[in-house]
Image (cartoon, rainbow, N blue to C red):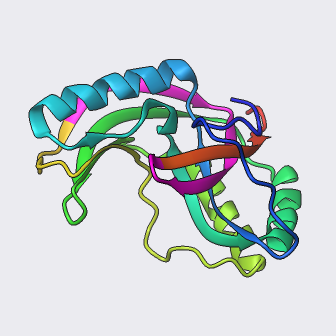
């Protein structure tokens, strides 16, 4: 997916000098992996109910930034372009849920060191720019279902993912649902 590609059928609005945007950083799977994850979501939905995440919105959040002012966004992008973090292999091999918000997800049983390093570096950069982020421990996951009635955790057929890049995303709330727009992609360094 290229920077500037809109994941829904609307036109982006350019930000004015004093505006802010709702942003987050995420690993964005290719279409093949998105399709596999969407198929899994539909399979889980048949058993557990709930609402599937739209295929084009499937991603692994690294850090949610919230409302970010334009000057902070510019500084953030500059910092991210120089970040030195290695590519990594991620194995999505576990399905679970967050019962308090009725979300079903998939994620890795083992978190690669490079993923932890990336998350920590992004948090450090964000805080240095005055962007507040969540304080809870990072639990990498991909949301597949919302409003599900399942409370069971299970193993799933492992889905390997070679993570070579991450993205700066704008989240827009629209009447038809959430729209994500990739603003810029950042390549991870080869191991």
Residue 186 shown left or right of residue 174 in the figure: right
Quadrant (top left/top right/bottom left/bottom right) for the C terminus = top right
Q: In which quarter of the image is the N terminus?
A: top right
- Residue, x 73% and y 70% (percent of image)? 20
Q: In this view, does 38 lie to the left or right of 156?
A: right
Dominant secondary structure of the magenta stretch? strand
Span colored in magenta: 155-177
Q: Does the magenta stretch include residue 165?
A: yes
At which x and y percent is residue 181?
Answer: 65, 44
Where's residue 108, x and y in %? 39, 41
Picture quadrant of residue 2: top right
Q: Left or right? Give the position of 16 relative to 40.
A: right
In percent of width and height, residue 133 lies at 57, 74
Above or below residue 125? Residue 78 is above
Residue 189, given in percent of the width and then of the height, sits at 78, 37
Q: In this view, does 94 lie to the left or right of 114?
A: left
The residue shown at (20%, 44%) is 50
Nearest the eye: 145 or 92: 145
* Front one among 90 and 42: 42
The extreme front residue here reads 175
């Amino acid at each position: 997916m290229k920077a500037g590609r809109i994941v829904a059928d609307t036109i982006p609005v350019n930000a004015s000098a004093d505006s802010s945007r709702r942003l987050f950083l995420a690993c964005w799977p290719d279409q093949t992996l998105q399709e596999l994850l969407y198929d899994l979501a539909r399979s889980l939905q048949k058993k557990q109910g709930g609402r599937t995440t739209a295929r084009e919105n499937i991603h692994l959040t690294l850090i949610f930034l919230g409302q970010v002012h334009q000057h902070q966004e510019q500084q953030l992008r500059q910092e991210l372009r120089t970040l030195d973090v290695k590519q990594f292999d991620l194995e999505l091999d576990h399905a679970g849920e967050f019962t308090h918000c009725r979300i079903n997800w998939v994620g890795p049983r083992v978190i690669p060191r490079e993923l932890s390093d990336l998350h920590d570096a992004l948090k450090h950069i964000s805080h240095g720019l005055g962007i507040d982020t969540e304080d809870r421990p990072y639990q990498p996951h991909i949301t597949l279902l919302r409003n599900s009635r399942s409370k069971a955790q299970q193993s799933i057929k492992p889905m390997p993912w070679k993570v070579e890049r991450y993205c700066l995303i704008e989240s827009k709330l629209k009447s038809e649902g959430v729209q994500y727009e990739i603003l810029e992609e950042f390549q991870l360094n080869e191991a």
